Amino acid sequence: MSRDHVNQADLVRFADERVNLKREDAAELRAQANRLRDKLEGYLADHPDFALKKMLLSGSLAKGTALKSISDIDVACYIASESAPEKIADLIEWLAKKLETAFPNFKPEQIKRKTYSVGVNFISTGNEVDVVPILYDGDPEWRGHLISQETGEKLMTSVPMHLDFIRKRKAENERHYAQIVRLLKFWCQLRKQEDEKFRFKSFMVELIVAYLADRGLALDDYASALAKIFAYLANDDFETVIAFDDYYDPGECAASTDPVRIWDPVNCENNVATLYTPENKSRISEAALDAGDAIDSALRAITKGETVRYWQKVFGPTFNP
Ligand SMILES: Nc1ncnc2c1ncn2[C@@H]1O[C@H](COP(=O)(O)OP(=O)(O)OP(=O)(O)O)[C@@H](O)[C@H]1O
Ligand SMILES: [Mg+2]
């Protein structure tokens, strides 16, 4: 039995050592983002009419799904819509200027205009906070138009509601939901390294795991959970429309001819996977088929060496229990 060679404890140890962002590092990065948030609050206390209303840690650091290889800290910045320029390039320039005003201690070169966001660089640590604009009209649930970091499109959504959605899934599968997501994100990262055309957005991974867990998939045995998720991806080939009843009735989701349909849990007119082509889709299904086969083989292998070699097909050469 190959659980003797690679067991749950080995997978947990691998995750801790190679996959997960360490708790202390996450705390430090969060603290850095929160210092910016507090600075903005301080500025707003003296300038209540200022157009930037709030900063909120979004992304994987807020959700507890960050990998060790995390590259930037995502922060959503709520902007009073009436004062913001319409065109994205103008909006970014305008946001950068507002950030320069609110954070006068930052040197100009620390505030970097990007295509759809503004990077704020901390010299001491080299970390970059990616400030993503959300056009905001005062909704109490902090719904607003998020500027898509992929297309610059304005997407009606709510980051705090996303965080609640994920928090709920984490509470239902304590430790395991976030761990399965991180292991899958790590797998995606390896696939991207070997195939530049492979893409599988983190938020999509999180929503698929939530969808399967909501329908009874057990997440506490990682080998078995991963094998089942890969089998689902390979067999379903994104035929199933993914939607959630937390904030709307999935029956009301817009009909869509997009190849992959994964509706935003707070807005069933926003397909999180709208950019995914049939080619993107089949690359994920094919990679999932290989990964599922490798785990099945690992579970049947006789020797330790053979078992580890199969797991390495999934998690790469650093998997070495
Ligand atoms: N298409 C979208 N529609 C609605 N919200 C989105 C969309 N894309 C991103 N978001 C919001 O931005 C957050 C971060 O997105 P994403 O999952 O791409 O990155 P991440 O969780 O920070 O992962 P990574 O570790 O890859 O950086 C999501 O949790 C969600 O709140
Ligand atoms: Mg991120």
Image (tube, helix red, strand yellow):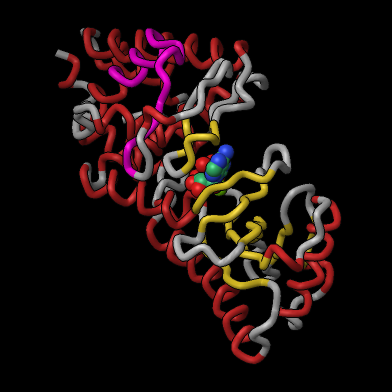
Work out whether residue 309 can be spotted.
no
Q: Quadrant of residue 5?
A: top left
- Give the residue drawn at x 25%, y 16%: 304
- Give the residue drawn at x 52%, y 56%: 143
In this view, the residue in front, 127 or 298, is 127
In the image, taking residue 15 as reference, residue 160 lies left or right, namely right
Coordinates of residue 112 in the picture (x, y in percent):
79, 60
Coordinates of residue 21 in the picture (x, y in percent):
44, 50
Q: Quadrant of residue 41?
A: bottom right
- Give the residue drawn at x 50%, y 27%: 254
Q: Is residue 84 above or below residue 166?
A: below
Q: Check if residue 192 falls in the magenta segment.
A: no
In the image, the segment drawn in magenta is 227-246
Q: Is residue 157 above or below residue 233?
A: below
Farthest residue, direction bottom: 46
- Give the residue drawn at x 46%, y 47%: 66
In this view, the residue in front, 121 or 4, is 121
